[in-house]
Amino acid sequence: MEIERLRYMADQIARNFAAQGEAEAAEATAEHIRLFWDPRMKAALLADDRSALSPVVARAVDLLEG
């Protein structure tokens, strides 16, 4: 799967949680990715350049690594 598509999907997830505030949205996005994305998708997102991600998704990726 192309990284652009993964970024788009992660941003969609983050937008769904946006009303919760940035910190909570990042946690919920990380949890969703942890539960529902396959290992190859997660690995590609984790290897991606953080500057290419939205702030919420970048924070979610940091949480996934932590």
Image (cartoon, helix red, strand yellow):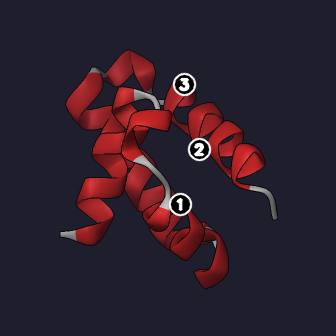
Element at label 1: helix
Q: Which residue is mark 3?
A: 15
Q: Is residue 30 left or right of residue 41?
A: left
Res 10 label: 2
Q: How packed is label 1: few (under 14 Cα within 10 Å), some, or many (20 or more)?
A: many
Q: Secondary structure at mark 3?
A: helix
Type of amino acid at the residue the image marks with label 1? Leu
Quadrant of the image occupied by residue 16: top right
Q: Nearer the viewer, residue 12 or 43?
A: 43
In the rendered image, which quarter contains the N terminus? bottom right
Residue 55 in the image, given as x and y percentages of width and height: 35, 28
In contact (CB < 8 Å): disc 2 and disc 1: yes
For the C terminus, the image quarter is: bottom left
- Label 2 vs 1, first from the N-terminus: 2
Secondary structure under badge 2? Answer: helix
Mark 2 surroundings within 10 Å by alpha-carbon count, few (fewer than 14), some (14 through 19), many (20 or more) = many
Camera-side residue: 1 or 27? 1
**Cα separation between marks 3 and 2:** 9 Å
Whole-number angstrom distance, CA of label 2 to CA of label 1: 9 Å
What x and y, as percent, mark residue 46? 44, 65
Residue 45 badge: 1
CB atoms of marks 1 and 3 within 8 Å? no
For this rendering, which residue is in front, 18 or 59?
Answer: 59
Q: Disc 1 and disc 3: Cα gap in Å?
A: 17 Å
Q: Position of residue 60 (x, y in %)?
A: 34, 49
User: What's the amino acid at mark 2?
Assistant: Ala
Indicate the amino acid at tag 3.
Answer: Arg
